[in-house]
Image (cartoon, rainbow, N blue to C red):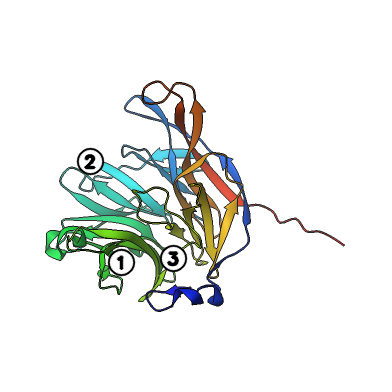
Amino acid sequence: MKKLFLLPCFLVCLIGFCYGADVAYKFTILDLPIEYQGRPDILRLVDRNNKGEMIGVHYFGASYYLSNNRKRPVQLDCGGDTTIVSAINNASQIVGTCSGPTESNGFVHDLRTGSYTLIRYPGSDGTVALGINDLGHVVGQYWGFAFGCCIDRFHAFIWKDGVYSTVDAPDPDQMGGSLFAINKQGQAIGDYFHHVGLDPNEYDTVIPFLYDNGSFSILDFPGGQSPSPCCEGDTFPYDINNLTQIVGASYDSAGTLILFLFDDDRYFKITGLPENFLLNGVGINDKSEIAGSYFERVPCATCGLFGEPGYKYILHSFIAVPAPVKVVRR
């Protein structure tokens, strides 16, 4: 793995930080209908734990917990108009954010007791909670004008046993950090903006990383490309499990999405994706099972901006499990 700002590029493949073989997955579409403000829609799956419990969201803020494909709403009165769930651990604890026009608080909701705990970084103007491990440790992002100027007022944090800790990468040009997910070993994934120029808001790329109890390593899919000129990044980690497997996305030179699994310091391209797959978000459990949602891009004759040929985008949720390995007997 490439340590932050320590390893020269020509050594990368010599230490095993390479693109490995493909890994086959079996994808199953799981479109669970919901209704929001009288309009039919599909639930966007977000995460799945080892017990098969899942969480999902609606685009406008409704959240759901699912067990045995039966869903129930998750709506907490915790300082915001909407409740957005982000992750579920193997202890049936859900982490998420209550957000509104003037306030944003993270929360941990225990499904076993029905109780919840607010997560608000001390002195911050707002906090979002994005990941939780089996020990109940939470990661996310907080912000406030007391913590820096412009983009640099945003920082990543870990909440552990009631204590908040800021996590800033050891880069003098770091600004705007965030952590997305954490496992029970304390390993977390996140990213930050790399500042350039004189403008305090100016940056040239978004750098994803693995944080391992004080150590930072860059995540960089070999040969990955930015999906568009307006997107400053080429590697997008989404979740990490207790096996230190990371699921994420990148793009090839043609702009085609690549879903990858990072395991044992190697990147594996996940195969078996549906056609025209445009990822919306994923989570991974300790069985290497993936849950998430995507948009299927479908060509149509008249759906362009002015009635010309174009594309329509159909939302789907899915479950993906490692495909059985065929054993050749001799």
Q: Which residue is mark 2?
A: 81
Mark 2 crowd level (few <14, some 14–19, many ≥20, 10 Å Cα): some
- Which tag is nearer the camera, tag 1 or tag 3? 3
Residue 158, numbered label: 1
Residue 251 at x, y percent in the picture: 48, 52
Q: Nearer the viewer, residue 219 or 244?
A: 219
How far apart marks 3 and 2 lie (CA) works out to 35 Å
Q: Which quarter of the figure has residue 194? A: bottom left
Q: Considering only order in the chain, which callout, 2 or 1, is on the residue closer to the N terminus?
A: 2
Q: Nearer the viewer, residue 146 or 113?
A: 146
Residue 73 at x, y percent in the picture: 37, 39
The residue sitting at 51% across, 31% down in the picture is 298
Q: Which residue is mark 3?
A: 219
How far apart marks 1 and 3 lie (CA) works out to 20 Å
Q: Nearer the viewer, residue 265 or 5?
A: 5
Q: Is residue 181 left or right of residue 259?
A: left
Q: Considering only order in the chain, which callout, 3 or 1, is on the residue closer to the N terminus?
A: 1
Does dot 2 land on a helix, a strand or a loop? loop
Residue 250 visible in this rendered orientation of the protein: yes
Residue 179 visible in this rendered orientation of the protein: no
Above or below for 283 versus 240: above
Q: Amino acid at mark 1?
A: Ile
Mark 3 crowd level (few <14, some 14–19, many ≥20, 10 Å Cα): many
The residue sitting at 57% across, 41% down in the picture is 274
Does dot 3 land on a helix, a strand or a loop? loop
Residue 63 at x, y percent in the picture: 36, 41
Q: Contact, CB < 8 Å: mark 1 with mark 2? A: no
